[in-house]
Image (cartoon, rainbow, N blue to C red):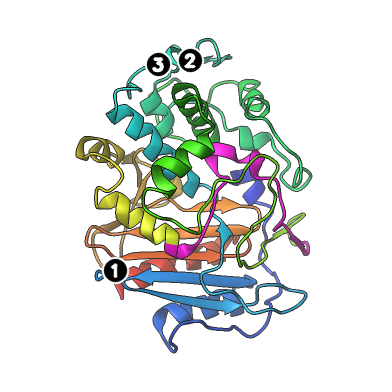
Amino acid sequence: MVSAAAAAVVAAGIVAPGAPAGAGPAPNGVQRSLDALVRDDGVPAALASVTGRDGRTRTYTAGVADLDTRAEVPVDGQVRIGSNTKAFNAVVMLQLVGEGKVGLEAPIDTYLPGLLRGDGIDGRAITVHQLLQHTSGLPDFAEGLDLVATQRRYFEPRELLDLALARRADFAPGAKWAYSNTNYLVAGLVIQKVTGRPVGEAITQRVINRIALRHTSFPSPGDMTVHGPHPRGYFPEQAGGPLRDFTEMDPSSAWAAGAMVSTNTDLNRFYRALLAGRLLAPAQLAQMRTTVPADALGPGIRYGLGLESRPLSCGGVYWGHGGTIPGYRTRGGATEDGRAVDIAVTTVPAGAAAQHLEAAVDAALCR
């Protein structure tokens, strides 16, 4: 969920944490990719899960779980999954669309009258569809957050929304595409209004429990802990500075846009189930997979409704989302034929290191 401004503080030159430890068979292309992320790019730990067409999963690790104790990385450890949360959020919203409780082309004022008002911002002109596809023009509240200073601060969703509404709209609704966490903040508020329940509860009941994601959760208010076995997450206070332990944090600063915790294997299960039609009716899955160009994310990347399509070097595409939050980055997704890969690292890589992470996903899916 980290904004472009926040991600920019992550610099190259992080000291590599030492010899990698592998949890999967090696030498292997996936293992070599993880080892290189630790050795050459300086991420403290890297974890991967690779699921084949037959549904069998292999897990891999490299690096250390804790820079102080040098503990081993737990196999398939839990991590904060950042903006992968948006895909879960979008699934719930599209389920409500399929049930006739939400209109995809309905204006936000239908559900939250008067909430979205500001300079160039009018909830009567912004639709649910535009929220989910990042074409609303709403400015990104994350651009106004000091994520280091607010590591343990609790935010009400309305506080985050006010940060966005204090700024002018980025563009007229529907005019173009631009990623904004505010879209999914508002989507979470719509879900709460329509269901009468917290968005985390809706995600848990409608997605997590439905496909038995046993290591996935939406944190309760005030919960700053990753509860299962996990590697610690690190984030520099300033560009080029030392890494700070960011494992314990209040994820309310991300909320419905990026607060969730999961494992690589659970993320593979989620994206495979989604593409297989186990979470959405065919009409809503087709809507989710109807994309627009998202060139700001990279060449050939397209954005649907909470779902990205990314080209593979071996042909075709994979579908996923990825996520970034201080301390962790996850990348991956699933293909039409049932392959799935997710890789997590325990800092927020920038520059070449970030590209190497993306390349590791591509290599794992194309092997």
Tell us which disc is closer to us: 3 or 1.
1
Magenta includes 244?
Answer: yes
> Does 173 sit left or right of 235 as displayed?
left
Amino acid under disc 2 = Gly
Residue found at x 47% / y 70%: 48
Q: Earlier in the sequence, mark 1 or mark 2?
A: 1
Residue found at x 60% / y 43%: 3
Residue underneath mark 1: 55
- Name the spot of residue 67 as percent of width and height, x first: 73, 73
Mark 3 touches mark 2? (CB < 8 Å):
yes
Could you give the CA–CA distance between mark 1 and mark 2, rounded to whole angstroms? 43 Å
Could you give the CA–CA distance between mark 3 and mark 1, rounded to whole angstroms? 40 Å
Tell us which disc is closer to us: 1 or 2.
1
Mark 3 Cα-neighbour bin, 10 Å: few <14, some 14–19, many ≥20: some
Q: Earlier in the sequence, mark 3 or mark 2?
A: 3
Q: Which of 188 and 303 is in front in this view?
A: 188
**Disc 3, SS:** loop
Q: In this view, does 214 lie above or below 90?
A: below
Residue found at x 24% / y 47%: 277
- Does any portion of residue 358 appear in the rendered image? no
Mark 1 touches mark 2? (CB < 8 Å):
no
Task: Write down the region rendered in magenta.
Answer: 241-265
Image quadrant where one finds the C terminus: bottom left
Residue underneath mark 3: 107
**Disc 2, SS:** loop
Q: In this view, does 109 lie above or below 198?
A: above
> Does 178 sit left or right of 309 as displayed?
right
Q: Which of marks 3 and 1 is nearer the N terminus?
A: 1
Residue underneath mark 2: 123
Number of marks in the rendered image: 3
Amino acid under disc 3 = Pro
